[in-house]
Amino acid sequence: MSDLLDDPARAQDGNGTAGDAMDVILAQWAQERPDLDCSPMGVIGRISQLQREVFLAQRATFARHGLDAPSFDVLAALRRAGEPYQLTPTALMRTALVTSGAITQRLDRLEERGLITRGRSEADGRAVVVTLTDAGRTALDTALPDHLETERDMLAALSPEERTQLAGLLRRWLISLGRVPGGTPDPS
């Protein structure tokens, strides 16, 4: 079994095809603790590995545009809002799933760079609105195609049908955990 650690490709998944490092780990647990179902490790472990790969790829993409993921998220949320590209800090917090302190820091950095402005709502003078500036829109519109290309490249091993299926499974899983805005846990 230890020789599989040197060459994880020699491991096999349950279908007899070449495996990965998680297959080695699962095979080791199957040998050491055959009484336990360790299959969740295969899913969660791979998601953890993929999360790291996605983070690194996105970080490189955003860096080419002078952005980071949190900045991109804020700019993208404002751009998706449509004309006049405004949202309240609370709406941005919900979109980004962060605390008020975290969103304030993001907004401070973006405002310093001239990518957003903060001001009073014309509809309700008490409310603060965040507005995407022309420079912010240009920054987002320039970075977005590169970001999408990075994501397409990362998913290249999956067919369009497999991507759709994976997206559906992940959506159902997230909703079942009750951690998605607008999602409700699946009672089944």
Image (cartoon, rainbow, N blue to C red):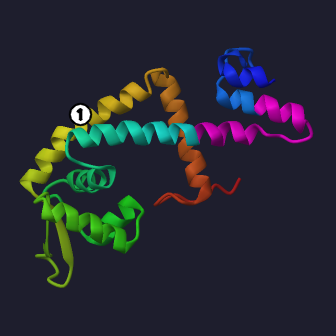
Q: Is residue 99 left or right of residue 87?
A: right
Q: Residue at x 44, y 38 (%)?
A: 54
Which percent across, then down, holds residue 62? 27, 42
Given the current orientation, which residue lies at the most extreme left position?
Answer: 134
Residue at disc 1, secondary structure? helix
**Which residues make up the magenta segment?**
26-47
**Quarter holding residue 78:** bottom left
Q: Which amino acid does label 1 sit on?
A: Pro
Residue 184, above or below 53: below
Which percent across, then down, holds residue 162? 52, 25
- Foreground pick, 21 / 162: 21
Q: Which residue is drawn at 43% across and 22% down?
A: 156
Which percent across, then down, holds residue 135? 8, 52
Q: Residue at x 90, y 35 (%)?
A: 34
Residue 124, above or below 188: below
Asked if residue 86 can be seen in this view, the reply is no
Can you identify the residue that label 1 sits on?
145
Q: In this view, does 28 lie to the left or right of 182?
A: right
**Quarter holding residue 84:** bottom left
Q: Is residue 139 magenta?
A: no
- Quadrant including the N terminus: top right
Q: Is residue 102 left or right of residue 64?
A: right
Q: In this view, does 24 lie to the left or right of 165?
A: right
- Foreground pick, 51 / 9: 9
Residue 184, above or below 44: below
Magenta region, main secondary structure: helix
Q: Does the magenta stretch include residue 41?
A: yes
Which percent across, then down, holds residue 18? 67, 15
Categorize mark 1 by other alpha carbons within 10 Å: few (<14), some (14-19), many (20+).
few
